[in-house]
Amino acid sequence: MIDSDLPLLNLRDICKSYGSTPVLNGVSLALNGGQTLALTGESGSGKSTLLHLAAGLDQPSDGSVHLDGEDIGRLDDAGRAQIRRDRIGLIFQQFNLVPSLNVAANVALQAQMANRFDAAFTAEISDRLGLSDLGARYPEQLSGGQQQRVAIARALAPRPELILADEPTGNLDEETGDIVLTLLLELVAETGAALMMVTHSPRLAQRLSREVHLSRGQLAVQ
């Protein structure tokens, strides 16, 4: 349950280093339910690292990540995995589809695990992403762009509170990319979810309500 008095996602003074190499240095930002945020910056600026930290896939060297007021860094691995399953939609550049499951089963997987499977909503998402005729195929039978669309549908099917997307249109043509972003924005509007999206496209970034630019591990523009 989202507490409307708190930011849905609150990153406080985030620092992250790998060995002696600093990647993020004191990054703070907050995102409320219903808000959309474009995260831009040159390669190596820390964008993907920040998304991984927001998802609880990695731990900050300093600072904290709060989801609806809860410090997810205080949770164990199982607790963070449960939050990702039940409350976060992850769309990363690695598709991470289950090779032994067909498209329909891959799309439904997270929603079923979170006990929020809605057959009609899943069918609607699949149709809008052009997957309706691919349900019986397996990941190895799909192009990269088709696999990306399956991964996006899987992330959206549970109607997550927070959507974290790393270049979600990077493997798609411009027309399909626009469809995907429209679907993301409509889901945010319909459900009150929040969206943080890494993108290199100024055109796509302009469609989101806020833009944050990372440079050398720090916020340069907000």
Image: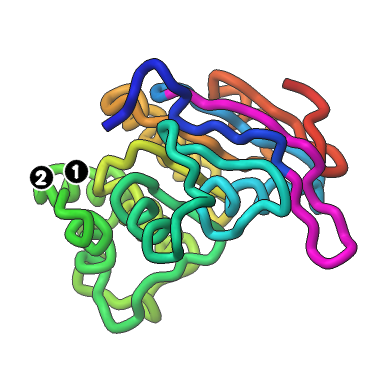
Horizontal side of 201 relative to 122 (left or right) equals: right
The residue at the point 45 percent across, 44 percent down is: 176
The residue at the point 75 percent across, 52 percent down is: 16
Residue kind at label 2, given as amino acid type: Ala
Residue 215: assigned label = none
What stretch of residues is rendered in magenta?
A: 15-32
Q: Where is residue 8 drawn, in percent x and y?
A: 44, 29
Q: What element carries label 1?
A: helix
Residue linked to disc 1: 124
Q: Where is residue 77 drawn, in percent x and y?
A: 45, 65
Q: In which quarter of the image is the C terminus?
A: top right
Find out whether residue 115 is within the magenta segment: no
Q: Where is residue 80 drawn, in percent x and y?
A: 42, 57
| Residue 124 occupies quadrant | top left
Q: What element carries label 2?
A: helix
Q: Which of 83 and 190 is in front in this view?
A: 83
Determine whether 135 is above or below 141 in the image: above
